[in-house]
Image: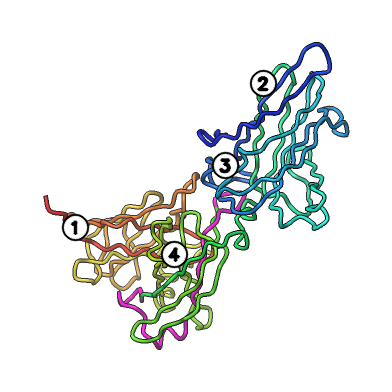
Amino acid sequence: MTRWGPCLVATAIALTACGPDSSSFQLELHFERGESHNCPSDSCGGVPMTCDARMLVRIADAADPDTVWLSACVDVAPEGSLCSLSSVVLPAAEIPQHFVRVQVAVWPTHELPTDMIASGGCPHVEFDHANQIESIRPTPALAGIDYVEVGADGVADVTLGCVDDLALSAPECSQNTFEVETHVDDFELFLPVTPAEASTLTVSLGEPRRLPAGSTWVLDDLDEMEQTILQPQPTWTTTRVIGFERTACVQTISDEIQASATIRCARFFPGAIDEGVFRIDGMQLDDATLDRLEQTLGGLPSTGLVVGQVVGLLGGPAEGAVVVPSRGTVLYLSPDLSSTNTVATTSSGVFVSLDAPFAGDAGDPTTWAASDGTNATLDVVIGGIVDNKVSTVSLHLAPPEPG
């Protein structure tokens, strides 16, 4: 488990012993980075928090959980990330010098019952024998427990599992809005889709999220975009009420029968919003191409795959280019997409990956680069496997920079 470094929550709890000696310890909160309730970042600044929250800290006898020495419900104002928890101040409590159980849970305030919000209370939380949270409604966004011997240990390290951390950054909690503008390119033609093609597309916007257990990424919080311009270049727009954590993806689905969902992703950061508009382009890959890939690969995995292309200086497919992802391996497709090799692109410029994850354990997206020995990509391109999606990666070669 990784500490929060400079954003470490160190909330002092004054614990007065029942005897001649007195003792105090610090409550330090950490993020779960294992297989269960895995958090998206090991830094409190890497997990957004834009909602008012209520935090429960409960200290009970380790042998008798019904004997409670402290039970405090504290309101936490959002400051943009989970570093907001560092502002928590707990009341003093008299606690015997023996083994105690420290239990912490955090809820977005708007998910609590109205009467509980008014009374300042918190739901009761229990953990099972494996220290996993029992089924409870409303579900805490964060929860964890630790055992500490009062008087012997000066720190209670409580690891918080991210049960539903996205609830702490719900759209209704932020009034910061910006426009998102999207164009869609045709994978085979290296050109924007025509107005006729655009009329068959459903275009949506979302962000991949990793499931709590394992390394599977899914496209979450999908918002369907509105086609606002048809001529000369089809354009889709939407209003985003809250930003993205790290990445944004455009999903396109044709109204053709059994059409696959194609996504194209890009990094997101506040500086990418230009005069209130964030621009990100999608990609449409037609069914005929997918059918050929399905035959060549022996099927399209439901877990998703990456389909990419290397574009040369003249705007067409680049032959003889080597693609290097930061994670995973690559197969290059023949000119008719009927076979593969592991050396370099053919005149199709097309490559696939069956094992490149969308991001690493710390949430950093997989990046892609290509070179034909003379020319190389300059822009940072991201992409990777997202469950049940065809993720597209487009790599444009550029001449070497002078000097």
Q: At label 3, which amino acid type do we have?
A: Cys
Q: Amino acid at mark 4?
A: Ser
- How many angstroms separate mark 2 from mark 1 (CA)? 58 Å
Mark 2 is surrounded, within 10 Å at the Cα level, by few (under 14), some (14 to 19) or many (20 or more) other residues, namely some
Asked whether the beta carbons under mark 3 and mark 2 sit within 8 Å of each other, the answer is no
SS label for mark 4: strand
Query: Which is in the foreground here, disc 1 or disc 3?
Result: 3
Q: Nearer the viewer, mark 2 or mark 1?
A: 2
Pointer 2 or 4: first along the chain: 2
Judging depth in this view, the residue of 270 and 319 nearest the camera is 270
Mark 1 or mark 2, which is nearer the start of the sequence? 2
The kind of residue on which mark 2 rests is: Gly
Q: Is residue 85 left or right of residue 98?
A: left
Name the residue nearer the viewer: 84 or 202: 84
Q: Residue at x 39, y 82 (%)?
A: 234
* Quarter residue 60 falls in: top right
On screen, residue 13 above or below 43: above
Residue receiving disc 4? 391
Counting residues from the start of the chain, the first of labels 3 and 4 encountered is 3
